[in-house]
Amino acid sequence: MGYFRENIERAKPYEAGFQPVSAGPSHDRPRRAGVVKLNTNENPYPPSPKVMEAIAGIDCEQLRRYPDPVGSAFRRAAAELNGVEPGWIMCCNGGDDLLRMVFTGFCDRRRPVAYPAPTYSLYPVLAKVQNCKVTEVAFDEEFNLPAKLAQTGAALTIVCNPNAPSGTFIAVEELASLADEVSGVLLIDEAYVDFAQANCVGLVKDFDNVIILRSMSKGYSLAGLRFGYAIARPEMIAGLMKVKDSYNVDAIAIAAATAAIKDQKYFKENVEKVKAECKRVTTELGELGFGVRVSFANFVLAGCMNCPASEIYDKLVERNIYVRFFNKGGLDDKLRITVGTGEQNDKLLAALKEILSK
């Protein structure tokens, strides 16, 4: 067409995980029963009942008016949970909204981004949109934090922790050292931290260049709502406010996310169920001959030893079971598998036993 900027014309869009037509209400297309969807890292359990109560309590007046542009109710609840003041919190339309903001705010042709790889595949897409240089520093086989990451001179350094798609966790002390060494901003993407043993929120009090990304999609079962938030010093939050959309979170989302984050009892119970199933799936995949490292997220990365990953993926699809296959170097011999309910995981494991026995 020739209308777009040259870097946009060249860019490839982000490839989201396949969304199979599955059980549930629909008004525009038929549904297939029996789909086991383990490919996009959603929480297999429903959100807190208090979320549905909050949504049901929305009145017409709230929809007629513009929402609170900063989501004050959620900021207060998230601040209390994380031990900071509300001015250290910014609401986002999912964690991806914050990622777009930091690329807009910190990166251009002269201000590069750096991150270890392989990691979340949206980072290079946003870099191409912003037309900034990318420095990818390879993880070793154990997914340790690369020492060279601190030496790139990037305006923005991103570390996904726990990392996607490996599920590995970098110690808080290591990330503190990185924050001290980098010359620019360090964004720690904690989208999956609800399932980890620690988090880096304390670093925002020690370093003025650290931003923490949090998501309500994983531990809180709100992937369809699109809500996330940033934690950083007020001066950093004020700068990010300059590049956010005017009303980036809507009234329904603010009410629902606030109800979810306040219901910590329900949240913790769900997280523990996912962690228990993750441990079981890891063990049983290992018994089937897969190479699976300990995961601190709600998914596992399984190395396929006895059959090509692409072949196993295809055979699972034939059985209406969907996992994630990345057809790229370093990952093309692996499958990323979301932790489902006990029943879903049983179906997956039974299918894998059948596939590998033939």
Image (cartoon, rainbow, N blue to C red):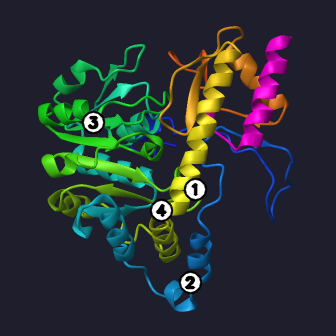
Residue 195, image x, y percentages? 48, 43
Decide which of tag 1 and tag 2 comes sooner along the chain: 2
Decide which of tag 3 and tag 1 comes sooner along the chain: 3
Q: Which residue is mark 2?
A: 58
Foreground mark, 3 or 2, reads 3
Give the Cα separation between the discs numbered 3 and 1.
26 Å
The answer to which of 111 and 16 lies nearer the viewer is 16
Q: Which residue is mark 3?
A: 172
Q: Which residue is mark 1?
A: 221
Foreground mark, 3 or 1, reads 3
Decide which of tag 3 and tag 2 comes sooner along the chain: 2
Q: Is residue 257 above or below residue 300?
A: below
Q: Amino acid at mark 1?
A: Ser
SS state under label 1: loop
Q: Which residue is mark 4?
A: 264
Give the Cα separation between the discs numbered 3 and 2.
40 Å
